[in-house]
Amino acid sequence: MTGVDSSKANNPRVAVVTGAASGIGRAVLLRLASEGFGVVGCSRRGTEHSSVQSLCSELDALGAEWRYVSADISDDEGRRKVVDTAYECFGRLDVLVNCAGVAPEQRMDILELTPESFDRVMDINLRGTFFLTQYAAKRMAEAPVPETPRAIITITSISAETASLNRAEYCISKAGLSMAARLFAARLAEYGINVYEIRPGIIDTDMIAPVRERYETLLAGGLAPLGRIGRPDDIADTVSALAAGALRYSTGEILYLDGGMHISQL
């Protein structure tokens, strides 16, 4: 689906956001679109899905220039389709925001974890995001370094460092993404591409719905000093700042957006 005539697209900057049909990805896509970015959003959901239809309506209401791509980033063709769309439609790519990710379909104790569940989560969260980033980085590196900031921002999770014994595959995938962000930061600095990791805590998305009551109880008991569940817009605020170059003399940085959950206390 498209909200732009590629022959007339004239956005000063362009962003690709994965996992854009819901949750954090949706909030990030809408925020960047509202700030004048040409945007390409993707998810596995087809254009007939109600969440995609409402997203496209919101983008139109913003007067944004946009494209939506139904693609699975665990597949090489899907990854290329997402990035290539940005260049075909807008002629450039300035910011990649990796939001796509899945939780295990069934939470299982680490001693019962199946290879099938492990592979599914790894294929999307880690392998898919890594090779999407690699492909996007290669294309971005081919262009001259612009005066405006360029960035790759990966949304990981507090689970990159906090053990959840009933979803080990998710924790491992996010820990792997954290190292991937550091590696890309070191490699891409010469091309003027800053790389950041945003590490959210408990955020109000569909992913936490099955355990929301438990999380609310833990937060009330002091799990995080700020004492509330985070919102997708909390993440979008930070992505917006990074995309604007607010931390231009920084790369490879981990930004915790977890209400202080990572603070060790006695």
Image (tube, rainbow, N blue to C red):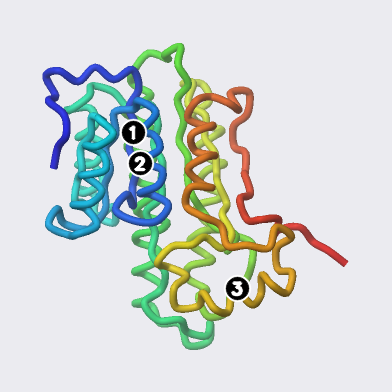
From mark 3 to mark 2, how far is it between C-alphas? Answer: 27 Å
* Image side of residue 225 versus residue 114, left or right: right
Which residue is label 3 attached to? 216
Task: Reply above or below: 214 against 187.
Answer: below
Residue 185 at x, y percent in the picture: 54, 34
Q: SS of the residue at dot 3?
A: helix
Residue 5 at x, y percent in the picture: 12, 25
From mark 1 to mark 3, how far is it between C-alphas? Answer: 32 Å
User: Which residue sits at x=48%, y=47%?
Assistant: 233
Q: Residue furthest right?
A: 266
Which residue is label 2 attached to? 29
Labels 2 & 1 near each other (Cβ < 8 A) = yes
Q: SS of the residue at dot 2?
A: helix
User: Which residue sits at x=56%, y=54%?
Assistant: 200
Task: Reply above or below: 45 against 13.
Answer: below
Which residue is label 1 attached to? 33
From mark 2 to mark 1, how far is it between C-alphas? Answer: 6 Å
Q: Between tags 3 and 2, which lies in front? A: 3
Residue 213 at x, y percent in the picture: 54, 78
Amino acid tagged 2: Leu
Q: Earlier in the sequence, mark 1 or mark 3?
A: 1
Label disc, if present, on residue 222 of the rendered structure: none
Q: Name the one closer to the observer, 60 or 223.
A: 60
* Image side of residue 235 versus residue 137, left or right: right
User: Which residue sits at x=62%, y=71%?
Assistant: 163
Residue 66 at x, y percent in the picture: 23, 34
